Amino acid sequence: MVYFIVTIYTDKKQGRGSYDEYIQEVRPLVEAYGGTYIVRSDNVMPLDERWKPARVIVIEWESRRDLERCLKSEAYKKIVSKRENSVDSRAVIVEG
């Protein structure tokens, strides 16, 4: 299995911009490519001042190939700017 782990940071002045639109559009796309959401929450309790995301997402995939197909798809390319232009997101791929 492969896990795509994302943390989202928002700017209090800028807000979430079009990120909420992105959230609505990305879920069916991820699921169409075989991704399963394990965690998708704004209910985050930081235990360290150095790591304070506003949102955490964990998506499980059967293979890295499936994950990469999703991220490289034309459908994803059409919506990714809604996230990139709205919030600071950081992601890792973890195999396990």
Image: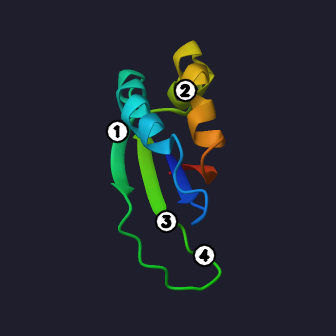
Q: CA distance from mark 3 to mark 4?
A: 10 Å
Residue pointed to by mark 3 = 54
Query: Which amino acid is tagged 3?
Result: Ala
Q: Is residue 54 left or right of residue 44?
A: right
Residue pointed to by mark 4 = 51
In front: label 3 or label 4: 3
Bin the neighbour count of mark 4 within 10 Å (Cα to Cα): few under 14, some 14-19, many 20 and up: few
Q: Identify which residue, 86 or 63, lies in the foreground.
A: 86
Looking at the image, is mark 1 or mark 4 earlier in the sequence?
A: 1
- Secondary structure beneath dot 3 equals loop
- Secondary structure beneath dot 4 equals loop
> Can you tell which mark lies on residue 36?
1
Q: Is residue 19 left or right of residue 39?
A: right
The quarter in which the N terminus is drawn is top left
Looking at the image, is mark 2 or mark 3 earlier in the sequence?
A: 3
Compared with 47, 28 (above or below) is: above
In the current view of this chain or complex, which residue is farthest to the bottom? 48
Query: Which amino acid is tagged 4?
Result: Trp
